[in-house]
Image: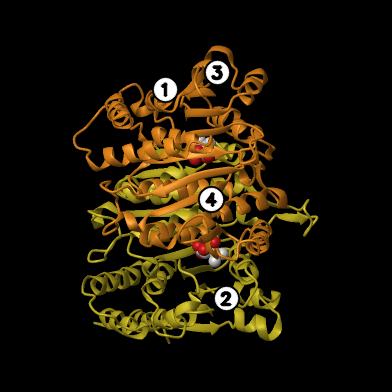
Chain colours: A orange, B yellow
Amino acid sequence: MASRNIRLAVVAGDGIGPEVVAEGLKVLDVIAGQYDLAIEKTSYDLGAARWHRTGEVLPDSVLEEIRGQDAILLGAVGDPTVPSGTLERGLLLKLRFALDHYVNLRPVKLFPGVETPLAGVTPEDIDMIVVREGTEGPYTGVGGVLRKGTPHEIATQESVNTAFGVERVIRYAFQIAASRPRRKLTLVHKDNVLTFAGELYQRILKQVAAEFPEVTTDYVHVDAATMFFVNNPARFDVIVTDNLFGDIITDIGAAIAGGIGLAASGNVNPDKTAPSMFEPVHGSAPDIAGQSKADPTATILSVAMLLEHLGLPEAARKIEHAVGADLTERSGARSTQQIGDDIAKRVAG
Amino acid sequence: MASRNIRLAVVAGDGIGPEVVAEGLKVLDVIAGQYDLAIEKTSYDLGAARWHRTGEVLPDSVLEEIRGQDAILLGAVGDPTVPSGTLERGLLLKLRFALDHYVNLRPVKLFPGVETPLAGVTPEDIDMIVVREGTEGPYTGVGGVLRKGTPHEIATQESVNTAFGVERVIRYAFQIAASRPRRKLTLVHKDNVLTFAGELYQRILKQVAAEFPEVTTDYVHVDAATMFFVNNPARFDVIVTDNLFGDIITDIGAAIAGGIGLAASGNVNPDKTAPSMFEPVHGSAPDIAGQSKADPTATILSVAMLLEHLGLPEAARKIEHAVGADLTERSGARSTQQIGDDIAKRVAG
Ligand SMILES: CC(C)[C@H](C(=O)O)[C@@H](O)C(=O)O
Ligand SMILES: CC(C)[C@H](C(=O)O)[C@@H](O)C(=O)O
């Protein structure tokens, strides 16, 4: 009998999702052997195919089953044959909201050997963690349409921000910042325009800061932040920001740190009242699906974050080191499977 | 008597605003001599100093006076000694909204000789125009706070989008796209999450596209767009986007095109029912204010946009060429005034 059982929900999803998830699981299986873990995987057939077949996106019964798992590994969601938003809102965001993933954790780290589009930038310059709020802001879906199709049509979207929601994500960000050598936390928002939400974030940042005197804080408008990502990424250590700003800046983060093929993320429920979900930052990339062209590295790094979350930091480090070594020695084009094999071999070795 | 009278409202504003505006006016005066223009300048003392002195941001009577002018040249607005948002919302956005500046026009163009932080990118790769909506979206100020200061506090911000507002900015963007060699228009939004507003933009884009069969259109999510700015800016020709997304991507645009010191913009009322306003994209930069360190080039290029808007394209080209030549031959640190002098001399020469 294995020393530890992990019930893992696998949502491979659309496009390149299944391809990259297969490689993530390949690496996870090696780790399982080494750490005496029994990974009980349950695959959930969710995404475009199911929607086309049955019209279902995420049935309540499936959501409840997933709720009983220890963690979720997700590939990617969304397909051009499905109306935009159907799968994103109905599946991905539904999971994040229903499972209270209030921390969307996104490291932005340039590994040695990886090419960045920025001139003259080294791995020392890009090493930050973005703590993106995951359960409110403009992502609530609150809003609507009035007088649709007429010249007087109005469409609204509401950003909803609560003291409860803002405080818990800010406190989490402080904890992360306190654990890192630079101990610096930057709030990214747009408080000069979105004055109601911005003032709430600013006020709570100041309040929580009192609990973490060792952490330095500052503030940057989101527009300026994107500029700093390009011309001074070293100024950032830990960033805390709202759901939409976090979405945007972590894509630039991925771009400067070597591309979307390397960017991992965790949708974390720190209170562990429901399983957390780990996924690459990239989307389903339908244009390259089924061609073994996708880079599974982001998914493999997401598996490392999953292990860390489950209390297996040593296993997580092992995967990160294997990825680091693989990235340093990359040369020539490899298939999705080949990259997975190479990293799995290093983890095994 | 001069052949043409131009009544110009000058709002120098805060921080480096007055310094860069002085150089913009220096260049404008040279042009005035050459094109037989009488520029009647009225300076409006608005910004942090006035607010501290009188508590006023933009009195109605001043707004009405400005409304009677032909155009506005603005420096920068905002100061750390004034509560965040007070001047931005009360002065800058108030002007944009009251004068119906529904097109916020922001060229992103890498001039030859200018350093970009992107490796291996040439001026051919960065030449786009962002058409940012200027009078609605998340910038309306609609929203509020409930139960302030309690653990049950809620802060909302509403993005308001109308068929009227979306259609007019999209039509303008098509006109710009149709006038450029590549004839390509990209909608940047986040329609998979902000489904109500996103669907409105998509639907109206398709409708208006029927009037411009020569223009190719495509769509990119805002998060992916920021990535493309960094690793494939050449994919963009003209972009149309909402107020907030436009704010964010034009700052990355400025970063990749040589920095915020070069990025010009026009807040345009294409129907000319009120004066349009031209301003550098940068802010008031209080950290370098009063030190003659600010680059006035963005303001000088904004003056060129102003002249173009007033029907003086030849004068606009003249300034752009002078700036282009100045940028190619830049060397060593020059003061704000020196850069203004150098460009003015080229325009004169
Ligand atoms: C697919 C989409 C809904 C999602 C988001 O906007 O959060 C994605 O862009 C991400 O960053 O995980
Ligand atoms: C100062 C601020 C209100 C403004 C904006 O957000 O529009 C600025 O960032 C800009 O881009 O002109």
In percent of the image, x 37 and y 40: which residue is there?
A320
Can marks 1 and 2 be said to lie on one chain?
no
Residue A245 - label: 4
Q: Are marks 4 and 3 in contact (CB under 8 Å)?
A: no
Can marks 3 and 2 be said to lie on one chain?
no
Q: Are marks 3 and 2 in contact (CB under 8 Å)?
A: no
Of badges 1 and 2, the one in the foreground is: 1
Q: Is residue B46 visible?
A: no
Q: Position of residue B182 (x, y in %)?
A: 30, 46
In percent of the image, x 32 and y 45: which residue is there?
A258
Of badges 3 and 1, the one in the foreground is: 1
Q: Are marks 1 and 4 in contact (CB under 8 Å)?
A: no
- Mark 3 Cβ and ligand 1 under 8 Å apart: no
Q: Are marks 3 and 1 in contact (CB under 8 Å)?
A: no
* Cα–Cα gap, marks 1 and 2: 51 Å
For the residue pair A129 and B56, the one nearer the viewer reads as: A129
Residue B79 - label: 2
Q: Is residue B170 visible?
A: yes
* Cα–Cα gap, marks 3 and 1: 16 Å
Of badges 1 and 4, the one in the foreground is: 1
In percent of the image, x 35 and y 67: which residue is there?
B313
Badge 3, how many Cα within 10 Å: few under 14, some, many 20+?
some
For the residue pair B107 and A1, the one nearer the viewer reads as: A1
* Cα–Cα gap, marks 3 and 2: 52 Å
Assign a secondary structure to mark 2: loop
What's the residue type where badge 3 is placed?
A: Trp
Residue A18 - label: 1
Residue A51 - label: 3
In percent of the image, x 34 and y 57: which residue is there?
A124
Q: Are marks 4 and 2 in contact (CB under 8 Å)?
A: no
